[in-house]
Every structure is written in C-alpha cells, then in structure tokens.
Amino acid sequence: MNLQELSNIAHKLVADHRGILAADESTSTIEKRFKSIGVENTEEHRRAYREMLFATPGAEKFISGVIMYDETIRQKTKAGVPFAELQAKLGIVPGIKVDRGVKELPGSPQEKITEGLDGLRERLQEYHKLGARFAKWRAVIDIGAGIPTAYCIRANAQALARYAALCQVENIVPIVEPEVLMDGAHDLGRCFAVTSETLKIVFEELANHRVALEGMLLKPNMVISGMKCPSQASVQDVARETVMVLKRHVPAAVPGIVFLSGGQSDIVATEHLNAMNALGPMPWKLSFSYGRALQAAALEAWQGKESNLVAGQKAFHHRAKCNSAACAASYDARLEKAA
Ligand code: 13P
C-alpha cells in the first residue's frame, strides 16, 4: 500500500469544488432508468448514454471522478478510446463499483447484506490495470418496524471494512458507502439515530480492519425525513442534523465526504449540499457523488436519440455546475433560471 498515493487521489476527488458522477448502475438498474424514457436496454444504448455524459465538454471543471460499472469500464467511445482513458486525459479519476449487489440477510430476511468479497483482490488488480484508481461498495440499511437490527449494521460494516482494506492494499481508494435508505415513513429524528449508530459501527470496523482514514472517502446518506413521512424537514434542518451526525462520527483524517442523492430530486440534493457547506468551515470537504440527481435531467433530455446528445450534455453540465457551486456554498436558485 502506498498511503501517499492513496491520500493524493482521495484529496484530488474532493478538491476545487469538484465531485463525483456515479454512473455505475448495474444492467438491471439502468434498465429501470431507460424504461422511464422508453429506451431499450441494449449494450449499445448503455454505451452511447455513458459516452454522452463522459464526453460532455467542460464537465471536468465540476467532475473529479466517475464511478463505472464492470461493463462500462471495458467500453470505448465511438472513436475507440476506452472510457477510463478519456477520463484520465480530462483530469477525471476513473472509478469502479466492486460490490456485487445486495441479497437477503440470513436470519433477518427483511434486511440486506452486500456481497462481493470473494475474489475481490484479483478483481481489484484487474480494475487497476484498466485504469481505476478508486472504488465503491454500497451497503444498505433499511428503517422500519424493528429494523435495522444491530446484527445487520455490524455485518454490513464488517464487509465494508474488509473491502476498504483490500482496496488500499491494491492502491485503490475505497469509497465506503453505508446508505440508510430514505424509503419509509420515519421522521428526521429516526434517520438521525440510525445514521448515527451506523456511522459509529462503520468507523469502529474500519479501525479494526486497519483502514487508513487518510486514503478513503465516505459516501453517506443525508439525515432526511423518510419519503412517506407526513412532516418533511426543511433544507436547514437537514443540513444542520447531517453536519451534526458527521461531526460526531467521522474523524478529521478522512479527506472528504461525498453524498449519495438516494432518491431526492436533483434541485433538493443541490440545495442540501449548499446549505451544509454554508455551515462551514468543516473538518473535511463536503461534496457529491450523485447518481440520479446528476443524471435525471440529462436522461430526460436525451430520450435515446443521437439528435438529443447536445441537449443531454447541456443538462448534465448544468447540474454538475450547480453542485460544484453548492460545494462552495455559492449555489443560488437564480443559477437554475440562468440555464
Ligand atoms: P444516487 O445518487 O442515485 O442515490 O446514486 C448514488 C449511488 O452511487 C448509489 O450507490
């Protein structure tokens, strides 16, 4: 492990008000996204869609890294340039999702455990050769009656820590993603309590597994009201509670925290990030690693048509720019109208 190199990459991913594009949807997840615009889920459509995003002129000013899926990191532009090479040339760090998705947690069938540790060392070595310099592993914690159990949090935290330790051995920066889902009717206080417990156990296991905090990034949920909660917390409340829970549990040695959007609308995800950075200074950089919140408008503009490529790129560029502004706490609703 080269800690200096890992730390340099981790810092680069959150420097200069840039953030990460999560474009690592599995083939079945991208199918859902394509269905919403009536596009058939073929390999060529997936390739063309990703090329549109990755080749957006000027996006590198706001985007520091891209998380890809196994198929995506092996794909090329129409002109034959591997996506990872295109990104590296633009100063964007190529990344890779390495978990193999969630399965039912044995003994607690309402809950999920993330799989993918077997053979991970060898896969990381291959991804490094393909250009990946950071990785992602997502654990899912659901809130409901009697869940999450302490068992589910612990089992997922141990898997996250094993993954992170392996990444560092292979000189790949691990993004540690424990996602407390926003589905459900729970309120802000319950999300705070579950996020707090989850982060506490995750950092305990990262320490047990001797993960170097300087060479990783955390990708958490925000502390937010459940989607079906009748009283939705304000942007200010979400910002305050999220920063509080992070300050309690995330050591200052971690270079950055890059949020997932988790089903928030794109504008709300930007507003939340902006409001948090306005509460600064923070011990770490607060940035984004959004999937849906960066892509929704671009997908809608694209509609699977080559004639809409420029419109799709414009929409993506705009969202990336707004989120970069939110990293500097300088986002303003007027930026939306200017588009
Ligand atoms: P969303 O921002 O759409 O939640 O996706 C981020 C991600 O990478 C989830 O694992």
Image (tube, helix red, strand yellow):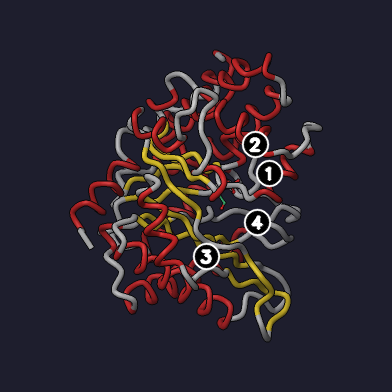
Indicate which disc, 1 or 2, sits on the residue closer to the N terminus. 1
Q: Residue at label 2? A: 46
Question: How many C-alpha atoms fall within 10 Å of the one at disc 4: few (<14), some, or many (≥20)?
Answer: many
Question: How many C-alpha atoms fall within 10 Å of the one at disc 2: few (<14), some, or many (≥20)?
Answer: many
Q: Position of residue 305 (x, y in %)?
A: 71, 21
Q: Residue at label 3? A: 195
> Which marked residue is nearer to the observer: mark 3 or mark 1?
1
Residue 182 image label: 4
Q: Quadrant of the N terminus?
A: bottom left
Which element is circle 1 on?
helix
Q: Left of 221 or right of it: where is 14?
A: left
Say if mark 4 contacts mark 2, CB within 8 Å: no
Q: Residue at label 1? A: 30
Indicate which disc, 4 or 2, sits on the residue closer to the N terminus. 2
Q: Relative to 250, say whether 311 is above or below.
A: above
The three-letter amino acid code for the residue at tag 4 is: Met
Tell which of 103 and 143 is nearer to you: 103
Q: CA distance from mark 4 to mark 2?
A: 27 Å
Which element is circle 3 on?
helix
Q: CA distance from mark 3 to mark 2?
A: 34 Å
Q: Relative to 143, say whether 29 is above or below.
A: above
> Which marked residue is nearer to the observer: mark 1 or mark 2?
2
Residue 164 image label: none
Indicate which disc, 3 or 4, sits on the residue closer to the N terminus. 4
Q: Left of 240 or right of it: where is 189?
A: right
Say if mark 1 contacts mark 2, CB within 8 Å: yes
Is residue 320 something one can see in this rendering?
Answer: yes
Q: Which residue occupies 41% across, 52% down?
A: 127
Which element is circle 2 on?
helix
Q: Position of residue 100 (x, y in %)?
A: 58, 63
